[in-house]
Image (cartoon, rainbow, N blue to C red):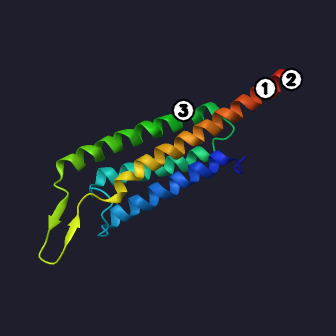
Amino acid sequence: MIQRIQSLYLFLVFLILTVASLFLQTGYDIPLTINTPLIWETMLVSGLTALIVIFLYRNRKLQFSVNRILILVQIILLSFFVYQSLMLSGENVSTTEIFSEKGIGRLIPVVVIILLALANKAIRKDEQLVKSADRLR
């Protein structure tokens, strides 16, 4: 059942992570995050995993578990971003302009964690609904 609310949350996770990783991969001059291959590969794999999880709607326990693993990966990514933010000076002075090295893209894992938590809440609600329907039989 692809029309469930958790499918929408997971699709948003897929879009956010793949678009952000493609920006990082192509090397745009957007201050998203530190541009290392490990980060954009992690974001891309997490996004594709979220897309695959959408189609696991028949096995809600597996869907819930994979979402928890994705939350853990995003927490690790967020902790890496926080560490890198603490190590950067914050401003880069060039001859023409001053711009911040700390990009808004560091909030991407926070948004993704919130969306995955909302998806898990909806999956748990569906599981409870199915269990209550089984008790009535």
- Left or right for 64, reference 21: right
Q: Which mark is residue 33?
A: none
Is 100 drawn above or below residue 84 in the view shown?
below
x and y percent of residue 105 in the render? 36, 57
Task: State which quadrant residue 94 falls in.
Answer: bottom left
Q: Amino acid at mark 3?
A: Ser
Lower position in the chain sequence, tag 3 or tag 2: 3
Is 101 drawn above or below residue 96 in the view shown?
above
Q: Amino acid at mark 1?
A: Ser
Q: Amino acid at mark 2?
A: Leu
Residue bearing mark 1: 132
- Left or right for 26, reference 83: right
Work out how far the residue at label 1 is from the one at label 3, CA to CA, in angstroms.
Answer: 21 Å
What residue do we see at 41% from left, 52% from top? 108
Secondary structure at numbered mark 3 = helix
Secondary structure at numbered mark 2 = helix
**How packed is label 3: few (under 14 Cα within 10 Å), some, or many (20 or more)?**
few
What residue do we see at 63% from left, 48% from top? 7
Secondary structure at numbered mark 1 = helix
Residue bearing mark 2: 136
Which quadrant holds the C terminus?
A: top right
Work out how far the residue at label 3 is from the one at label 2, CA to CA, in angstroms.
Answer: 27 Å
Lower position in the chain sequence, tag 1 or tag 3: 3
Q: Which mark is residue 65?
A: 3
x and y percent of residue 86 in the render? 21, 46
The reply to whether discs 2 and 1 touch (Cβ–Cβ < 8 Å) is yes
x and y percent of residue 66 in the render? 52, 36
Mark 1 against mark 3, which lies toward the viewer?
1
Outermost residue to the right: 137
